[in-house]
Amino acid sequence: MVIDELIEAARKGSQRAAGRLLSLVESPRRDEVLDAIGTVSVPQIIGVTGPPGAGKSTTVGALVSAYRYREMRVAVLAVDPSSPYSGGALLGDRIRMAAHINDSDVLIRSVAARGHLGGLALAVPAAIRVLAALSYDVIVLETVGVGQSEIEIAAVADPTVVILNPGAGDAVQAAKAGLLEVADIVVVNKADRDGADATVRDLRAETHAPILKLIAAQGEGIPELVDAIDEHHRADNPQRRLARARAQILSLAQSQLRNSPDLDRLAASVAAGEQDAYTAAERLFAERAEP
């Protein structure tokens, strides 16, 4: 099936066609798909990140239910660690969100990070454009949340929601990892556990972002989280959009440089003392710029 036919089928509700298009933008045919789509208005993108085990997928599932209650079409892009062998997404298509699996207005897609610095797959910006062209109203971008690199989620999302658990020094660890620097909203999930109030107090010393308590598995606090997301989105402005665009361009440019075939050769020459790192960096840029 040609790309135009896939787009038409996906717009008529074929999730198989939508999935095929998302696969194509992870392939060398990405530009073909984007050219066929043309200019689109990007819908709201909600970033969700945090340490493993914080309850990100449970929270995302509850958010999907909340937006479906509003009769909005929702897509979830879950950026997973890449398999070192196949490059595929290890966690599959998020079977833990199975409550929405038969809903034709919910698309759940796992995307392998493929070694991209920051955990955000190179294909994510393109996937967002595909989903925008297919008239999804909300895109939820979930990242694995394992460290400093996850702050790149802020380059594409507005707002960025950081999910933490009570106790265990999560507030301090999140601050050290840089997550709180980009948090627009902080959520303390599993707030029925001991230490929730103390964690909120610790977080208030680390961030000026709104802090909410949540019990995602029971749906408690989800309406308040949706309200906070809506309020933040309404406050968006051109300066913030420009900052996100700059961060996204720099992130993708850095990834392309890391994947350059010239990088290892230049690194070997620096390691051998044949040239300094400053000269090698200039040559890396110059060689990328050559036709």
Image (cartoon, grey):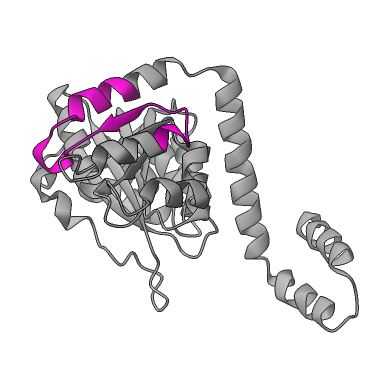
Q: Image height check: is 49 above or below 272? A: above
Image: magenta residue range = 203-229
Q: Nearer the viewer, residue 227 or 38?
A: 227
Q: Is residue 130 visible?
A: yes
Which of the 4 image quarters holds residue 250? top right
Q: Position of residue 224 (x, y in %)?
A: 23, 23
Q: Nearer the viewer, residue 219 or 283?
A: 219
On whether residue 21 falls in the magenta region, the answer is: no
Residue located 47% across and 27% down the image: 208
| Magenta-drawn stretch contains 207 | yes
Q: Quadrant of residue 68?
A: top left
Above or below 220: residue 114: below
- Residue 93 left/right relative to 43: left
Can you tell which quarter of the image residue 161 is in? top left
Q: Residue at x 49, y 29 (%)?
A: 39
- Residue 160 in sight: no
The foreground one among 206 and 232 is 206
Q: Position of residue 29 (x, y in %)?
A: 48, 55
